[in-house]
Image: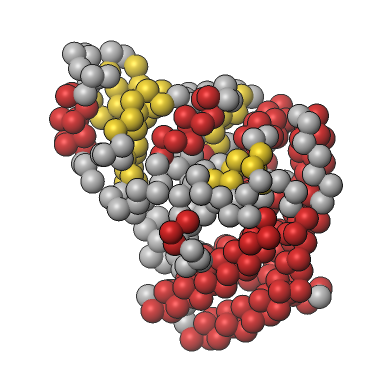
Amino acid sequence: MMNDETVLVYLERIPFFRNRQGLCVESSRHNSLKSTWVICADQNRYRVVQQVKGRSDFVQADGVKRMQERGLTHLRCLYHDVEKRLAVYNWLPGNPIFLFDQADATSMLTGDRTKNLIRGLVEIHSESSMGFSLVTDEPSYQPNMRGRWQLLPPNAYSEYMFRSFIESWEGHLLRARNRLLINEAQWRELMSIQKECRKKIEIDIGILDSVGTFSFLHGDLTPENIICHDSEIAFIDFEFWHYGDRAVELAFLLEQFHQADALSSGRESEFVESYQRELEASGVVDQYLFDRLSFFSRYVLWKFLVLVADGLTTVANDSLNLSLYNNLLCRSLALLKEG
């Protein structure tokens, strides 16, 4: 992976930045998946992203290019080096719609922003597919089918989502224990919860057979990837794009809103109803959306619980966010008691 110095040397040599004045790094951010730079040149800003080596199936620019072809994104890929796994994007003004520890999430989700967010989601989800594709490391399921363009049939979807849940739980729980992020009592409690969650999912997962067609999904719809400028909404970081059930992406986003206390239960219902109306207005009728969303709301919550136990939401993924963990734990136990 490049650092701040080597990325400038590289950028100076590519046609897009050659002979531009004032080329410099304004800021950078690095994690285990990618490095991101804000680059200044000719008094303009650009966003440069390089992905980690060895993840050839995750091509950052492909999702953006797909959206560009459909005319549905403010984000444009200006330069793409497949070999270096690096892409240059235009700069989008604005800020994430909210950050859990740095903003009042409720005040950020104004009426116009919420409407535009829903409209943007429907635009993303409006492309349909008769099959789904794999992008994640779990489950270890037909690894030769890891590409976004290789589609699996609808009758394999329930098994895929079940195995994804089980392998994710087992892997993250073992990792959290080995890294001493959870103590022995927490580990035993989570093991017990996993058994109960597995039973519930096995009983209810048949609802996924109602997925008529799959949708183009963003794949990493976190608040940090939703950029807000005044009332306008734009989406960034499409490297996990794939085809799947729109209900799971909606549940994933709503769970994060729930964690940030951004939507009351009444506003959440309005959000989902508005999403379905907008979806139908686009010509897509999803009769069982609410049923699948109900299933995935539990599925996503329980998956978040073990991810947080394994350090998710901390800066270096190396400690336990105890307040969030306790919130997810209490909600998970309450759902299991409801039966």
Question: Which quarter of the figure has residue 205?
Answer: bottom right
Above or below: residue 107 compared with residue 151: above
According to the image, what is the colour scheme of the structure?
secondary structure
Q: Residue at x 40, y 61 (%)?
A: 317
Classify residue 31 as left or right of residue 144: left
Above or below: residue 145 compared with residue 141: above
Front in this rendered view, residue 65 or 171: 65
Classify residue 291 as left or right of residue 325: right
Above or below: residue 243 compared with residue 294: above
Residue 252 makes an appearance in the image: no
Front in this rendered view, residue 104 or 144: 144
Question: Which quarter of the figure has residue 337?
Answer: bottom right
Q: Residue at x 48, y 53 (%)?
A: 135
Q: How many numbered callouts?
A: 0
Front in this rendered view, residue 38 or 156: 156
Q: Residue at x 71, y 46 (%)?
A: 213
In percent of width and height, residue 14 lies at 21, 24
In percent of width and height, residue 23 lies at 22, 21
Classify residue 150 as left or right of residue 264: left
Residue 5 makes an appearance in the image: yes
Q: Residue at x 68, y 34 (%)?
A: 126
**Which quadrant does the C terminus fall into?**
bottom right
In percent of width and height, residue 271 lies at 77, 41
Classify residue 24 as left or right of residue 155: left
In percent of width and height, residue 89 lies at 39, 27
